[in-house]
Image (cartoon, rainbow, N blue to C red):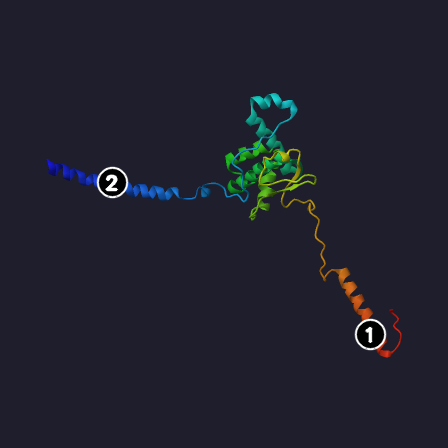
Amino acid sequence: MDNDVFEEEAPNEELDMAGKELKRRLESIKTTEIKKLIPQMPYQIPEHPIRVRSGTGEEHLRRLFPRQLRLKEIAKSVTKLVDQERIELPYFRAYETRNYTERLIAEAMRYGDCHKPTMEVANFYLNDKTLVHKLFKVLVPRYLNFTTSFTAMHLLPGMEIDWKDPKATRHLGQKVVLELKGNPYPSIFPDRVNNSKSLLHNILLAEASKEYYRKKTAAAAEGKPSEVD
């Protein structure tokens, strides 16, 4: 009887060893970076949404369907940004609009216009359906080799802001400019003055200075009063 029990325990030990090996392999699989399973985005999307208020005429709907109305308002701003490529918004609305626009462009770059779920997302956030064509045929090729964010947000003068604390109360009423990078408009920041010697006016001034000192030196050598004084 004891021998039978001893012989039956041997397969159990093999099963335990196989179970441990399987567990080890599963743990190694779990260590795979989850980031590889989702689109790689150069812009970090915050985990928690920021409250975006809708128009005063839709307050009753906002109370009944807060999430749906919030996405509806964000879709209006995303449509406006993709259409005009540079818009002015309150800080909170621009903050959320930027997040959704970044993700929309990243999904379009990853899956293309033949992917049904991506097309459904584009049709929802772009109220003007002609902008769906612009998204895939204009914006995607523009940002194909970008390693930074596709959008930029600039504070308008009048209030200081702490970017590390997007929910601070002092951000209320702060206006910002949200734009798509690579837009056809002039830069918001003025170009730095180029003092390069290769500029035409600098070349002319340098030659005039050389001519002045050449004449002055020649007149001094001949003992004549300089005509350039």
Question: Counting other residues with Cα less than 10 Å from the Cα at mark 1, is it few (<14), some (14-19), or many (20 or more)?
Answer: few
Q: Residue at x 62, y 23 (%)?
A: 58
Q: Quadrant of residue 119?
A: top right
Q: Residue at x 51, y 34 (%)?
A: 117
Whichever of labels 2 and 1 marks the residue nearer the N terminus, that label is 2
Residue at which label 1 appears: 217
Where residue 71 appears, x then y in whole percent? 57, 30
Apparent side of residue 44 relative to residue 190 in the rendered image (left or right): left
Tag 2 and tag 1, C-beta contact below 8 Å: no
Q: Secondary structure at mark 2?
A: helix
Q: Residue at x 60, y 32 (%)?
A: 74
Q: Secondary structure at mark 1?
A: helix
Where residue 100 appears, x then y in whole percent? 57, 36
Q: Which numbered dot is residue 167?
A: none
Q: Quadrant of residue 161?
A: top right
Quarter the N terminus occupies: top left
